[in-house]
Structure formats: structure tokens, C-alpha cells
């Protein structure tokens, strides 16, 4: 076989690997409704970004939403623009980020270890149940994990290029680009975690002096030119944004004790080992005697992966609040260490134990995803929207009663933010952090005028309904208890029902008749008052 044919076969093999991986990671993304609240929230914000035409400011129900930076929303809104508002498009950011992470990990491992270890690391990563599920989940965790992983690998590549006497600053510049991407994906951890990991690795390998090479000013300028403009722009438009974003959602969330998912210090370690089974069992093959026989580069890579895994786990174990997605950046390091344990068994032939490991992992992924799909397909908002979709016009107005349904606007393809009806005065004092009420109340402080039109009480709802355009239908979503308080729903049967979730529709003609009936008594009272004055 000629060199050209060998190269062509290699390219074909890589393309097939890519296609199979994309199919494997994305197959469930097209048939699973959005999971609430996270997927519904982030996809809903991206949908508002597209329909409003405002790509600079993320909005939740028409109000500025500054819990997270905009990179995920930009990618998702762009995918809606290109491919339409489908479930696959809503998860494309996470899917592409997972694919980038897997390909980069294969390249990195093959370059510094060997191709067999690279194959094992690649397959171990994409069959980890944690990674597999996260690649199809529309939130920010996979995107920022990919940015962090790319930054760490490129920073290590830069260090090794220095030691080889080449000083390839292209790796430093690319590391800065992905670090900026990490900041735009989820905030300071996009920069802090790579610094922590690379700094720790250089410390344990006794070459901390190499940190000075990262202070090359063109690379630092590149980072700040990419990472800072959006933050400065938001502060110029919304005074107090920087304090809210960095102090409240970084410092206070890290040190506070009043956020959701509170867990003990040791929580992440057993969870990580469990969510990467059965491949994580191969970590037991990493024995000291065998590790000592490794080459210096193998040991250097291993130390990088240990620092990567241990320091990020330690960092996120300190806060009391421990959402599961926070530790996703450690998955590439876990995969490489697992592969290095597996490599001890793969000398000449691919052993049966590895086949069994990957087959068991794949079966676990499929079973788990099947259970998730079965549960998600029972989501009330998805089923309600499926029943009424042909009747919906994008200009219609949605009203939500006492529960913000993050995904309903996306499913109904509406272009206007919903009106959220609740007892907002009570909510100001009673809600906890990480609730939908708190999110909307905090957003209200950045745009009180819009909030007055979006966050309504029952007493002003009729007035708002009667100010709608003549061609706008009204949709009301809520349960029977909440709906019983509204005069406009008296005697009106819901158009769709799923368990205790109801959806009512008022055509433009019904809205006009309702508003006319409300105003006519006032007109009669005014006329009678006028006649009484004339008689006197």
C-alpha cells in the first residue's frame, strides 16, 4: 500500500470515528424533552435572545439575567437561527463542546503517550455515564468544562515546547483564547481552575519558575480583549452589574451556606467514582511499582492529570453548595488516568476485560438515558405544548400563574415574554436563593420598568389583557387552584390538560368580548352619574 493510500485510509478512519462518536453522543438529544429547570431556563434565555434580536443582554422573561455570561446563549441562539428551534439545536453547544474535548484529549494523549493509550482515553471518556449524559444536556457545564480542558492541555503543551527549546507561543495564545471562552461560558472559574491546575503541576514537578513565560504581554492582551468587553459593556448599561455578578454569584456562592444542593465536604469523590463506573475501577491498576517504570514523559503526564483531578475536586469541595455539574472539568483527567491503568493490560492483544468494561459502560449509558427519556417525556409543559401547537401564533401572549414554566415559551414558539402572575410582595421576603422567584426578583432591580409590565398581580392582570392588540390570542397556564381566582377564566374550559396542569386559550374575539363586558358597567355608571347631575 502506498503512503498516499495509507494517509487516505487514516483520514477515513478518523472520519468514521468522528461520525460514530457524534451519533453516540447526540442520538438521545433529538428525542428527549428539556429537563427542568436547567435546560428549560438556559434554552429559554437563548430563545428570547433570538426572538428579541438583543444578542448582547441575556433575558429571562424579558428581564436582564446576569447569573451567567452569554457564550452558551450565543451558540444556542445561533443554532436556532441556522437550524430552527429543535431539541437537537438546543443541545448543540453541549454536544460540540463534548466532541471538542474528546478529540483534543485523543490528540494530546497520542502526542505525549502513545496511540493505544489515546484510544483507551477517548473511549473511556465518551462511555463515562457522566460525560455521556452531560454531552446531551443543555446547560453551561459541558461548555465550560471543554474550555477549561483545552486551556490546561494547551498550557502544558506550551511548557513542554519551552523545555524542548522551541518556545511555541501559539500554544500560549490558544490557551488564552480558550481561557477567555471559559470566562464567557461561566465566569471566573474559566480562568481560575486552569491557573490552579497548571500552577499546582509546575509546583509538584519543581519548575514553578516556568510561570514567568505565561506573562508574555501580547497573550495577556489577547485574553483581556476577548474576555472583558462584554462585562464592561454590561456595567456601563447596568450599574452594579460587576458587583452582582462577581461578588454575589462568585464569592458569596463559594462561601455562602444558603444556596441549593448543600452536601458534605467529601461528597464529590464517591459520586465521581460512581458516575464513571465501570472504567474507574481500572484506577486500581496504577500501582507504585509499575508507575516507577514509566518514562519521564509518562510520569509528567500522570502528575498533570493527578493535579487536574485532585485540585479541581478540592476546589469545589470547599463550598457547602455542590451542584453535580461543577466537577465536570475533571472528566478528561479521569479518562487519561483510567486509560493509563488499562494500558498495563494491553501489551499486544486487546484483552477481554477491556471489551467487557466498555460494553458494560455503554449499556449503563443506554439504560440510564432510556430512563431519563421516559421520565422527561412526561413533562407537563412539553405535553401541553404538543397538544395545542397548531393553534399557536408567535404573536400570542402567554400568562403563567404562580409558577414560571421555563420551557413553555420555547415549545409554543412565542416571540413575546410571558406575563408572570404571582404575589410578588410576599415573594420579596419569603423566597430562597436558586428559586425562579428569586431569579426574577433580582432581575427586576436591573430593569424595574420592564418588570412592571412582566411581573403582575391578579389585580392588574385584566388591565394588561385589555391593552393587547386585536389579533393577539391569550394563553393561560396554571393549575385549577390558581385559575379559580381569575374572573376571566370563569366558565371557560381548558383547551389542554396534563395531570394538574391546565392550558386555556382566549381567541382575540373572546378577549374583546371579555374586555367590553368589563368596561360597559363603568360606562353605564358614568352615564347615570351624568344624568343625575343634569337633573339637579
Image: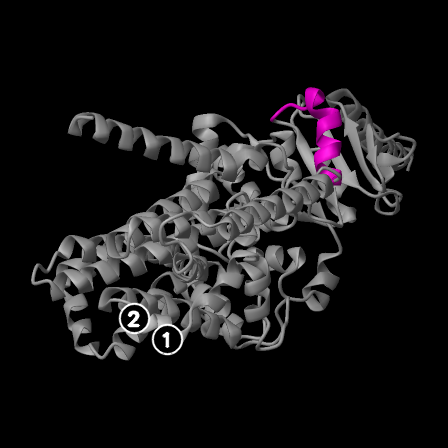
> Picture coordinates of residue 313 (x, y %)?
47, 70
Q: Is residue 308 visible?
A: yes
Q: Quadrant of the N terminus?
A: top left
Residue under circle 2?
A: 293
| Residue 396, picture quadrant | top right
Q: Residues within 10 Å of mark 1 (few under 14, many from 20)?
A: few
Q: Is residue 446 left or right of residue 534?
A: left
Q: Residue at x 54, y 30 (%)?
A: 85
- Label pair 2/1, CB-CB below 8 angstroms: yes
> Picture coordinates of residue 397 (x, y %)?
67, 32
User: How many marks can you see?
Assistant: 2
What whole-number distance in Å separates the C-alpha atoms at marks 2 and 1? 7 Å
Residue extending farthest left: 165
Mark drawn on residue 213:
none
What secondary structure is found at the residue carrying circle 2?
Answer: loop
Q: Which region of the structure is painted magenta?
A: 379-394
Q: Quadrant of the C terminus?
A: top right
Q: Residue at x 39, y 76 (%)?
A: 288
Residue under circle 1?
A: 289
Q: Is residue 323 visible?
A: no
Q: Residue at x 88, y 32 (%)?
A: 531
346 to 469, vertically: above or below = below
> Picture coordinates of residue 432 (x, y %)?
67, 66
> Picture coordinates of residue 211 (x, y %)?
20, 72
Q: Is residue 383 magenta?
A: yes
Q: Residue at x 47, y 47 (%)?
A: 126
Q: Is residue 59 magenta?
A: no
64 to 307, vertically: above or below = above
Secondary structure mainly formed by the magenta segment? helix
| Residue 425, picture quadrant | bottom right
Amino acid at each position: 500500500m502506498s503512503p498516499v493510500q495509507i494517509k487516505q485510509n487514516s483520514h477515513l478512519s478518523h472520519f468514521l470515528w468522528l461520525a460514530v462518536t457524534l451519533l453516540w453522543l447526540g442520538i438521545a438529544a433529538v428525542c428527549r424533552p428539556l429537563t427542568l429547570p436547567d435546560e428549560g431556563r438556559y434554552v429559554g434565555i437563548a430563545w428570547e435572545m433570538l426572538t428579541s434580536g438583543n444578542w448582547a443582554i441575556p433575558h429571562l422573561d424579558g428581564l436582564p439575567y446576569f447569573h451567567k455570561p452569554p457564550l452558551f446563549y450565543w451558540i444556542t441562539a445561533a443554532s436556532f437561527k441556522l437550524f430552527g428551534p429543535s431539541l437537537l439545536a438546543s443541545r448543540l453547544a453541549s454536544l460540540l463542546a463534548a466532541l471538542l474535548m474528546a478529540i483534543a484529549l485523543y490528540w494530546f494523549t497520542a502526542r505525549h503517550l502513545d496511540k493505544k493509550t489515546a484510544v483507551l482515553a477517548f473511549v473511556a471518556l465518551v462511555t463515562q455515564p457522566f460525560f455521556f449524559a452531560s454531552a446531551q444536556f443543555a446547560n453551561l457545564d459541558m461548555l465550560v468544562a471543554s474550555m477549561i480542558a483545552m486551556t490546561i492541555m494547551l498550557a502544558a503543551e506550551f511548557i513542554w515546547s519551552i523545555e524542548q527549546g522551541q518556545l511555541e507561543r501559539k500554544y500560549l495564545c490558544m490557551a488564552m483564547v480558550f481561557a477567555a471562552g471559559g470566562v464567557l461560558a461561566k465566569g471566573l472559574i474559566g480562568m481560575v481552575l486552569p491557573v490552579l491546575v497548571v500552577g499546582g503541576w509546575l509546583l509538584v514537578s519543581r519548575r514553578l519558575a516556568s510561570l514567568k513565560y505565561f506573562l508574555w504581554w501580547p497573550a495577556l492582551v489577547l485574553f483581556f480583549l476577548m474576555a472583558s468587553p462584554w462585562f464592561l459593556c454590561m456595567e456601563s448599561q447596568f450599574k452594579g452589574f460587576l458587583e452582582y455578578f462577581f461578588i454575589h454569584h462568585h464569592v458569596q456562592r463559594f462561601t455562602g451556606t444558603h444556596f441549593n444542593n448543600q452536601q458534605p465536604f467529601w461528597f464529590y469523590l464517591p459520586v465521581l467514582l460512581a458516575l464513571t463506573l465501570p472504567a474507574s475501577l481500572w484506577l486500581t491498576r496504577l500501582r507504585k511499582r509499575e508507575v516507577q517504570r514509566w518514562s519521564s514523559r509518562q510520569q509528567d503526564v500522570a502528575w498533570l492529570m493527578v493535579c487536574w483531578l485532585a485540585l479541581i475536586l478540592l476546589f469545589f469541595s470547599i463550598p457547602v453548595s455542590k451542584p453535580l455539574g461543577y466537577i465536570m472539568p475533571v472528566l478528561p483527567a479521569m479518562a487519561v488516568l483510567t486509560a493509563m491503568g488499562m494500558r498495563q493490560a494491553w501489551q499486544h492483544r486487546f484483552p477481554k476485560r477491556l471489551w467487557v468494561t466498555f460494553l458494560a459502560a455503554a449499556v449503563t449509558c443506554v439504560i440510564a438515558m432510556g430512563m431519563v427519556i421516559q421520565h422527561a417525556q412526561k413533562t407537563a409543559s412539553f405535553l401541553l405544548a404538543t397538544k395545542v401547537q397548531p393553534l399557536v401564533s408567535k404573536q400570542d401572549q402567554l400568562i403563567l400563574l404562580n409558577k414560571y414554566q421555563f420551557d413553555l415559551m420555547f415549545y409554543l414558539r412565542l416571540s413575546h415574554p410571558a406575563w408572570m402572575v404571582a404575589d410578588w410582595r410576599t415573594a420579596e421576603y419569603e423566597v430562597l436563593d436558586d428559586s425562579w422567584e428569586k431569579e426574577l426578583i433580582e432581575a427586576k432591580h436591573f430593569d424595574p420598568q420592564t418588570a412592571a409590565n412582566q411581573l403582575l398581580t391578579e389585580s392588574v392582570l385584566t388591565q394588561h389583557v385589555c391593552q393587547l392588540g386585536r389579533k393577539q390570542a391569550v394563553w393561560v397556564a396554571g393549575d385549577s387552584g390558581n385559575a379559580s381566582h381569575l374572573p376571566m377564566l370563569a366558565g371557560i374550559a381548558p383547551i389542554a390538560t396534563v395531570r394538574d396542569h391546565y392550558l386555556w386559550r382566549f381567541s382575540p374575539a373572546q378577549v374583546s368580548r371579555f374586555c367590553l363586558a368589563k368596561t360597559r358597567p363603568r360606562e353605564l355608571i358614568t352615564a347615570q352619574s351624568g344624568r343625575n347631575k343634569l337633573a339637579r
